[in-house]
Amino acid sequence: DAGVIQSPRHEVTEMGQEVTLRCKPISGHNSLFWYRQTMMRGLELLIYFNNNVPIDDSGMPEDRFSAKMPNASFSTLKIQPSEPRDSAVYFCASLPGLGSYEQYFGPGTRLTVT
Amino acid sequence: SQKIEQNSEALNIQEGKTATLTCNYTNYSPAYLQWYRQDPGRGPVFLLLIRENEKEKRKERLKVTFDTTLKQSLFHITASQPADSATYLCAPDYGNNRLAFGKGNQVVVIP
């Protein structure tokens, strides 16, 4: 298995632009998490899907952030409009479910907003 | 809200010695706690899970303890090797498969 796949690996954009981050979870996993990691705040949970349904989006910073999971093999995190304070590494993780609790992380997308 | 504390200072340790990391949490009672390893430029990788009714868990050279009274977990790497150099993240759960991650503790194993 290729593991969790994220794209792009790096994204540099200007303030005000729309940014879309993509994630393909491990096949058969039924939960998906989006995290943001910064030096100041560490790894923060943004949103959590179970069976493609958003369960907890309380970590989404504001209305500029939105996430979708149209099917079991794909999810997107969109920021519109982007701001410099959104610069961070964004991770996607998937969870097998069925009594297994370990999360499998992707390689992350490093976002820089100038 | 959940608060997870890990030592922000890097732990420098001689090869062969035991590295011990501390994780303290407040404001809630997790059913289990996980430890992850993160290397620079990569995503965290799961190492160990310990449940609230377990005092200790071992995996090869790793050992984790969980004290629900003290609200603390200790993570030990015995016979440390340079390849163990990384950042280690503590992650108690707060329900519904969600984890609250600490900022991590960097370990540097000196040959």
Image: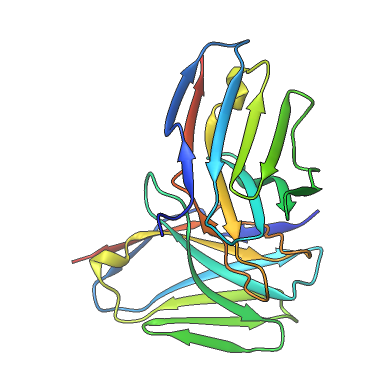
Q: Residue furthest left?
A: B111
Question: In this rendering, would B3 be left or right of B7?
Answer: right
Residue drawn at the location 63% of the way across and 89% of the way down: B55
**Considering only vertical position in the picture, is B108 above or below B80?**
above
Query: Looking at the image, which is closer to me, B14 or A108?
Result: A108
The percent position of residue A81, horizontal first and vertical second, equals 67, 15
Q: Quadrant of residue B96?
A: bottom right
Q: Quadrant of residue B70?
A: bottom right
The percent position of residue A57, horizontal first and vertical second, equals 79, 43
Question: In this rendering, would B11 be left or right of A114?
Answer: left
Q: How is the image coloured?
A: rainbow
Number of numbered discs visible in the structure rendering: 0
The percent position of residue B1, horizontal first and vertical second, equals 81, 53
Question: In this rendering, would A34 be left or right of B21?
Answer: right
Residue drawn at the location 59% of the way across and 70% of the way down: B34
**Considering only vertical position in the picture, is B95 above or below A9?**
below
Q: Quadrant of residue B80?
A: bottom left
The percent position of residue A40, horizontal first and vertical second, equals 58, 39
Query: Looking at the image, which is closer to me, A47 or B108?
Result: A47
**Image quadrant where one finds the C terminus of chain B:** bottom left
**Considering only vertical position in the picture, is A87 above or below B75?**
above
Q: Residue furthest front?
A: A71
Residue drawn at the location 66% of the way across and 60% of the way down: A30
